[in-house]
Image (tube, rainbow, N blue to C red):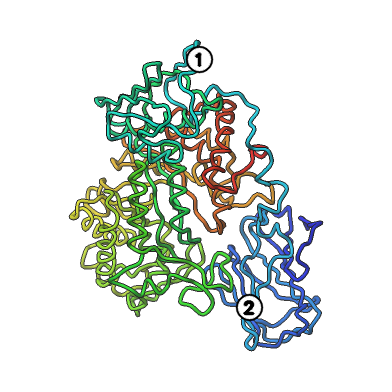
Amino acid sequence: MTGQNPNVSNPIGFQFRWQPNLKSAFDATMTIPLNMGKSIAPGANLCFSFARSASLEVLSDDHTLATEIAQDGDFYCITFLEGVPKSSTVQVRFFGDGAPLRKWSDAPAGVFWDIAEEGLTDVPPADNRCLGDLENLQFVSVDTGILESTIEAPGALVPAPVDQQNPSDSSGLWSIPNSIGYRSNHPVSFWFAELISQDFHPDNDGPDLDIQVSEGMATDAYELRVAPEGVVLKGGPEGLQLGLVTLAQKVWQCSEGVLKPTQISDQPAHHYRGFMLDVVRHFFPVATIKKLLDSAAWLKLNHFHWHLTDDDGWRVASQAYPQLNKIALRGPGRPLPPQMGSGSKAYGGIYSPEDIKEVVAYAQARGITVVPEMDIPGHARALIRALPEIVEAGDQSQYESVQFHRQNVLSVAEPKVLTVLTTLLDEWLELFPGRLVHLGSDEVPEGAWTGSPTAKTLMEQLGLSTVEALHGWFLRQLQDHLTAKGRQCGGWEEVRTGQSVELDQGVTTDAWVYSWQGEQAGQDAAEAGHPVVLCPAQTCYLDLAYSDHEADPGYYWAGTLDLQKVYSYQPRAHSKVMGLQACLWTELVASEQRLSFMLLPRLLAFAEVAWGTANLEAFDDFKGRAAHWQSFWKALGWNGVRPESHW
Ligand code: ACM
């Protein structure tokens, strides 16, 4: 057994221990003391989330207990068929095939007793590391001298510009006090004011920074000259904004309070520089999304992919289908059960149209386009639970999704499903003005639709020979709907399922493809003519654990991902590769603190890769620059940034 914790802080909580050194199996035990002073009577339930498909054995003092076990997604509920005397312990053994357990964040989460007369009683972990609880771990303490970086960097611009000349006579030009006024001849400067609103005010009483702005370059190129005469900025429509971010970074980094002369010529290698947040597995309020948008804008990222629907929730309020608003919270006894450790509490949230408009406007003001994702036809358990009438009654298909769902795929041959989705999409189009709408399309489990009579009939009518072709037909209906409204659809790499360009089946090559299981699917899609966004999990999934350390939280199915590995990603260029995207899935991200811990500083490395100036030989230089940002993230309000001592 591994991971003995010397500081057991909660003796009434559960302990979790796993067998190390297994190759392709796992075997672990959760031990719960019965110290409520009562015995457990038959009929009691023990419930929790556990993100593996496991066989369970339940024991008390080495005696195997008779139980019934129900599983819904990652939510397990054990019903005791026999009693357990007080002052004994209950042990739940988890075993099965698959990757061995390696981390505290693999432990069961949201554990509670559900006992008829007593209601719900939480069982916290005895051992903080079961939660990967960062504050309580020396290993990841966030407050240890991170403000003083010892590494000298001439400037800490991230992403590094393509070309930067710092004249050797770099005597200071302007002292930068806490508050400074600026003068500008161009309205784009208001964007600058928005970005650094705490420090800058147009025409206030402080010394004025004269910003001369002129247009006339390629879209996202810019040139910035900071000289004794003032600041001169030239650029294309987006380039001007990007140049202002550079200026903002320089002003903020005036550690001696003096802005130095510089000449920068810059342009990103990729037009699409995105980041994705899953707000379904765990919900994040508008305030957190805004903080994230601020952080992204400072790193010159320009697309926010908002993963808004999944098996575990539907986060966009609907007027047409108010049933969706009723499943905003998951919890015991609700249509959506606890999941991802949400435990005994009613947990979740939903964005109102006003919330979404606020986020979209906030993003727009920072040069960021919001790409909403409605994940269909798989990953749709929440929609199905909200609208059970859209399920085809006679469908005998048997399948299990990666997250152990047996009913999370829409009945694509039922006409009412298309009606629901196009109605919902039309609602979304009112809220999201960006051209791209992401339709998910990932991870439809094998077996879906194979036992569906309506699918069989429709396939015969359409002359389709496989359920993959049916998947493609369905997506094409939605793509055509979006196209007719002047929009463009995107999807994960599986959006090409059932595609045959010769037969005009499946989505057309106008569909954007986001490759995630590796880079090859993206390159293949680019070769076929699709616009492509590369987000290979191995280097772009920031939900992956940073290291192998057992207390470092996160998934590791695609390996671990430290700063250097993010930085070392060298995407293959192709004219159809529009750019890159970092993704944060939130199965294990239950708090804003964990969110920033997973994101920062890795998002800086990603931003430089997406900009095209990452250079592995200069990784130390990058680290030095990134270190300067630690105080900035704190000032922005992130409380869980990974400390430099653990980069
Ligand atoms: C994905 O990670 N299923 C896109």
Task: Identify the residue at horizontal 64%, vertical 44% (top origin).
Answer: 547
Q: Which residue is mark 1?
A: 171
Q: Look at the picture and state if 87 lies above or below 539.
A: below
Mark nearer the N terminus (1 vs 2): 2
Observer-nearest residue: 174 or 343? 174
Residue 456 seen in this snapshot: no
Q: Left or right? Give the position of 197 relative to 319.
A: right
Q: Left or right? Give the position of 114 relative to 207.
A: right
x and y percent of residue 164 in the render?
44, 20
x and y percent of residue 239 in the render?
32, 30
Q: Residue furthest top?
A: 169
Q: Which residue is mark 2?
A: 78
Task: Identify the residue at horizontal 36%, vertical 39% (top origin).
Answer: 272
- Label 1 or label 2, whichever lies nearer to me, is 1
x and y percent of residue 634 in the render?
57, 43
Q: Left or right? Give the position of 143 relative to 167.
A: right
Label 2's element? strand
x and y percent of residue 288 in the render?
48, 53
Residue 210 seen in this snapshot: yes
Q: Could you give the CA–CA distance between mark 1 and mark 2, rounded to whole angstroms? A: 71 Å
Dot 1 alpha-carbon crowd within 10 angstroms: few under 14, some 14 to 19, many 20 or more: few
Q: Look at the picture and state if 605 lies above or below 397.
A: above
Dot 2 alpha-carbon crowd within 10 angstroms: few under 14, some 14 to 19, many 20 or more: many
Which quadrant of the figure has residue 133?
bottom right
